């Protein structure tokens, strides 16, 4: 009896030790569809978007065969407040390859992530798909098709998604969605050249920069002092003036700036080839060449608690990017490699719910890669061994230059199968993609 009770106590202790693992496994086994929003809850923000293949003419630009959402490109801006349930009904009228919508930077439940072939089938012509998610984050995001992503995004299937904090009085903002349409037509909010937005002298404006292109760009400001308030939809701690510097914009990345309209004249937000003037009607705004110095978020702002301890990592991964010669559509070319392998012979990163994951991403491929992980935000720990010394720097789109190594960390808190790929969209089609999976 004594032995039996001893054995029982031992078994109970073992079960106790194992409980966390078993509990985590049980959570992981949940069907991802069950993690989506209660189907009976009414939407707070409801948008219907109809995708069409048609001729598009950017304001001030030249027509091309592209795509629209509700007859326009970019598609309508979607705005919601933190905590609201967003419902978007996507209809495909006649896009032959099918369409989806991905909420870039929003850590939605997996089933709502909009990745054709991973979280849903592409919506064929004549059909629809309804996305429902709660706006848990507040910040600047964007949406785009994730089916035949390169031609569809370049051709027009994208738009801005702005999630406002529940507590803040809605400050004036200005969206600057940078996009290059076929034929090299650089636009801001769909217009070539100079766009304008009215604002009173003295007004503080939150400028929401979104780089929807496949290549990095930068933005700079004339006519106002400015601070960088957020990167990739996450506020930076202790923002300070960045006057005289340019703000780097990763492909797929966002940056929020705070500018003030001067008492005379206007503010100009410039990117190479286009600009947005913010101020009273017809007020003049000067132009300036791109500053040579760029803001470096590795040391910008004030340190703060990031909410978890990356030193206590449960898993460490390497993600080394290279390239190898191969055949692309039957023609010789280069494939991007991950840890030396060509897709599909590349690692799938397996985690368990609750893991603290540290990943080192290095690039020795000869070109820059804007790496984008779905469903999670990554905390930048270091670059080339130099630790982050400023604000916690959270990214969903990280510009990794040739020769660079970043160390990043995240908490695995969003079960599912998630794409992790280069947001230079042709590169993703050339093999620079893998998945993060919970198991
Ligand atoms: Cu902005 Cu996988 O995408
Ligand atoms: Cu790339």
Image (cartoon, helix red, strand yellow):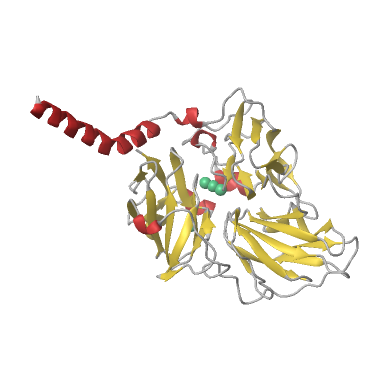
On the picture, is 203 further left or further right than 341? right
Q: In what quadrant of the picture does the C terminus appear?
A: top left
Extreme-front residue of the structure = 2
For residue 102, say whether it is visible.
yes
Percent coordinates x, y for residue 119 in the rendering? 49, 35
Asked whether residue 194 is in view, the answer is: no
**Residue 143 location (% of width, % of height):** 62, 44
Q: Is residue 338 above or below residue 110?
A: below
Q: Position of residue 8 (x, y in %)?
A: 17, 28
Q: Nearer the viewer, residue 255 or 201?
A: 201
Judge whether 194 appears above or below 350 on screen: below
Which image quarter is the N terminus in?
top left
Q: Position of residue 218 (x, y in %)?
A: 63, 66
Q: Nearer the viewer, residue 203 or 193?
A: 203
- The residue shown at (46%, 31%) is 32
In the rendered image of this protein, does residue 420 appear above or below residue 200?
A: above
Q: Quadrant of residue 387?
A: bottom left
Residue at image point 36% right, 51% down = 342
**Which residue: 60% across, 72% down?**
294
């Amino acid at each position: 009896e004594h032995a039996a009770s001893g054995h029982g106590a031992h078994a109970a202790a073992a079960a106790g030790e194992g409980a966390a693992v078993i509990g985590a496994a049980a959570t992981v086994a949940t069907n991802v569809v069950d993690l989506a929003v209660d189907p009976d809850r009414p939407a707070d923000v409801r948008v219907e978007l109809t995708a069409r293949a048609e001729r598009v003419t950017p304001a001030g630009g030249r027509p091309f065969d592209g795509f629209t959402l509700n007859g326009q490109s970019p598609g309508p801006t979607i705005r919601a407040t933190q905590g609201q349930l967003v419902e978007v009904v996507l209809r495909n009228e006649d896009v032959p390859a099918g369409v989806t919508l991905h909420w870039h930077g929003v850590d939605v439940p997996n089933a709502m992530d909009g990745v054709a072939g991973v979280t849903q089938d592409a919506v064929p012509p004549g059909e629809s798909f309804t996305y429902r998610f709660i706006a848990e984050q507040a910040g600047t995001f964007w949406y785009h098709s994730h089916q035949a992503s390169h031609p569809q995004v370049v051709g027009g299937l994208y738009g801005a998604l702005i999630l406002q904090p529940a507590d803040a009085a809605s400050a004036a903002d200005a969206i600057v969605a940078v996009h290059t349409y076929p034929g090299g037509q650089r636009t801001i909010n769909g217009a070539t050249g100079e766009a304008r937005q009215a604002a009173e002298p003295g007004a503080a404006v939150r400028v929401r920069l979104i780089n929807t292109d496949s290549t990095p760009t930068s933005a700079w400001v004339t006519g106002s002092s400015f601070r960088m308030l957020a990167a990739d939809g996450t506020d930076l701690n202790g923002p300070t003036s960045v006057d005289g510097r340019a703000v780097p914009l990763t492909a797929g990345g966002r940056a929020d700036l705070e500018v003030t309209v001067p008492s005379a004249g206007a503010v100009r937000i410039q990117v190479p080839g286009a600009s947005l003037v913010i101020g009273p009607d017809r007020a003049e705004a000067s132009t300036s060449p791109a500053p040579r110095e760029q803001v470096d978020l590795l040391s910008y702002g004030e340190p703060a608690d990031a909410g978890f301890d990356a030193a206590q990592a449960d898993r460490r991964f390497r993600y080394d990017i290279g390239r190898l010669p191969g055949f692309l559509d039957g023609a010789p070319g280069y494939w991007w490699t991950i840890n030396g392998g060509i897709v599909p012979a590349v690692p799938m990163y397996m985690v368990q719910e609750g893991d603290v994951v540290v990943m080192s991403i290095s690039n020795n491929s000869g070109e820059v890669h804007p790496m984008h992980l779905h469903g999670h935000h990554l905390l930048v720990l270091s670059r080339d061994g130099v630790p982050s010394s400023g604000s916690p720097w959270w990214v969903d789109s990280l510009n990794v230059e040739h020769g660079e190594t970043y160390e990043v960390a995240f908490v695995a808190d969003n079960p599912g199968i998630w794409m992790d790929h280069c947001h230079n969209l042709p590169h993703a089609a050339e093999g620079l993609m893998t998945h993060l999976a919970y198991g």
